[in-house]
Image (spheres, helix red, strand yellow):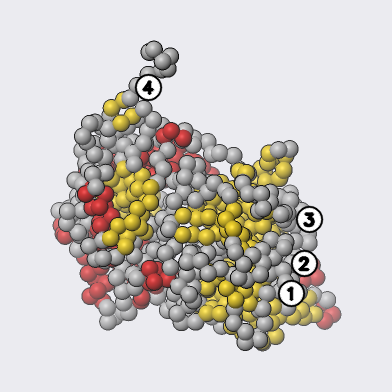
Amino acid sequence: MATGRFRVVTTVAPFGRWPSPLTAAAMAAGKVSLSEVASDGHGIYWLESRPSDGGRVVCVRASRDGDGWKLDDISPPGSNIRSRVHEYGGGAWCLVPGHGPGAFAYVDMGDQRVWFVGGVGMAAVALTDETPAGERWAHGGLCASTDGDFVLSVRERHGAGGERPVRCIVALGARPQTAGTTAVLEGHDFFGAPALDGAGRRLVCAVWDHPDMQWDASAVVVAAVERHSGGDSGTVTLVPTGERWTVAGGPVESVGQPQWQGDGSVRFVSDRRGWWQPYRHSGNDDGLPPVPLSDEAAEFHGPDWPLGLTTMAELGDGRVVARRSRDGIDALVVLPATPGGASTTLAQPCVAISALCRHADGVAFIGATRQEPATVWVTADVGEGGAQAVRPRPAGSLPADDVSVGEPFEVTGHSGRPVYGMFYAPRLAGTEGPPGARPPLVVAVHGGPTSAASAGFDTVTQFFTTRGFAFATVDYAGSTGYGRDYRCSLWGQWGVFDAEDCVDAARSLADSGRVDGARMAIRGGSSGGLTALNALLVPDGFGAAASWYGVTDLADLAASTHDFEARYTDRLVGVLPEAAEVYRQRSPVHRAAELNGAVLLLQGTEDAMVPPSQAEGMRDALVAAGRPCRIHFFEGEGHGFRRADTLQAAYEAELAFYEDVFHL
């Protein structure tokens, strides 16, 4: 060519059949989950769940190595760091100051005991006794005292005979002179985020009771504690004094993340003004109200499905760095030390941030950009801005030219409700669809249903967009990130509003000409599976639904689910037995003959939250009704697949399902 430039050759290929470089095997092996970042001022630590190692969770330490970082696994050999408190776990480890470098406590998945490692490379010693015969114990929400004498934990005790579990906060001695276990706070159904103040005299935590979930109604409680000498043995334990008071919370207020500030005050989040915003209180029983640190109409917290959520960190000068979520996008903001001052936004590349902590004069955090998967980042100084990736780019990442970047959208459904989402167009460098053709659409439904979709890079999204599918995520009524009113708008309407919103979003994309309205599928996991299946009840919408370990029978779920969610459906559906007919109408297993499309069911055989019987019942109902159905069981998998071979097989099965249903 006269310009001297190479001519770009474009390949025309049918939508859904593009030659994607992202294989199911590579995606499954690289789908590493990162959580619970922490720092001791020198090293940065986090947990990694690795599909290639059977889903084992390890602790990783990053230390400076010239201009880069050196990464080391510091978990004891064979350990698997996971908690089963509330079944969703969380807070499965914590750094313990005052011991050797890198000292930490952790919960092992195998026995659910708390173990202590006194420094990098040292052997682990048990801080808790073996579980008594006939019982099942779990620990989580770990936090250490500032002097390293004690480790606090939420303890969950399941007795014999199917009795409801009992929970409390226990203090575990981390030194020979503090060896032993004492209960320091009891009397509530649920506890989260325990922490001792710097003097070791006040314990703060979040509490809530049935029938509430943490995001519905909860409270921040402070209890006085003291050290008690064991007499001749010389052993010192931490015991309650009997004094306790409530800092915030109530029947229409959700609170979370209580933490002690350097000046002895307590910081927490509350939605008392309609948004999860940060507050500060003296932490004393003085009757004074908490003071807000920000008045932004944005979320600074999320639902406490797992324990250990950390989206705020105090700097040395009293300022607070916080994750702020607004319109589906996360940012880091610096809040002033004195309430009432202006906040500033910290320059960094991530749009989805799941955890953060202070590191030296800056912060470390886990975040995903629009074009890169989640990794660990660090800022040297919050005043300078910018962030450096600590963890290398994962193997098999896509070239930037192949990445579909999400476009936020908001539509008004036929009900008049706002529906929020993110649209991802098909994208593969050098490839386009046939002239005049429109791509098939896959809509992803988040679980929960009290949760939200992430705006960050996700390999599942790109698995489809690089093959010529359009992809969309939907934050339906009841999703988090849009204030308390929106979060509570699903009360009494689960199985209806969520499904309607997903159909409305898909129809809007079809009406705008961006997707093929005759080839639209919906996928979801857990509660998202219920939404996906119920969406097939709406005519002229989706033609296929893929349910990953999804709920199909609400009455059975309410009768058999674990204690954490035992009353979850009271508000979302209704109180049983009075609402029995509502439960039946919202359960796709009882309406199989009315579903307008094909169904794929993916189920783990060891799922304790949505048992295999739910998938089996749905299959039987669909077969009896003459509706197309495929089902795959995965041995040894629970609620959320973890092994690379399982993930690969599930992704391949889902892709083949869409190809067949839509004749791609």
The quadrant in which residue 459 appears is: top left
Hey, what amino acid is under mark 4? Val
Quick check: can you spot residue 162?
A: no
Q: Dot 4 lies on which element?
A: loop
The spot of residue 605 in percent (x, y) is: 39, 55
Which is closer to the viewer, label 3 or label 1? 1
Quick check: can you spot residue 322?
A: yes
The spot of residue 367 in percent (x, y) is: 54, 50
The label on residue 100 is: 3
The spot of residue 199 in percent (x, y) is: 76, 74
N-terminal-most mark, 1 or 4: 4
User: Does the residue at mark 3 contact the one at mark 2 (Cβ under 8 Å)?
Assistant: no
Dividing the image into 4 quarters, which one contains the N terminus?
top left
The residue at the point 49 percent across, 35 percent down is 396
N-terminal-most mark, 1 or 2: 2
Relative to the observer, which residue lies in front, 282 or 541? 282
Which residue lies under the disc numbered 4?
Answer: 8
The label on residue 200 is: 1
Dividing the image into 4 quarters, which one contains the C terminus?
top left
User: Does the residue at mark 1 contact the one at mark 2 (Cβ under 8 Å)?
Assistant: yes
Hey, what amino acid is under mark 1? Gly
Q: Dot 2 lies on which element?
A: loop
Q: Dot 3 lies on which element?
A: loop
**Label 3 – label 2 distance at C-alpha:** 12 Å
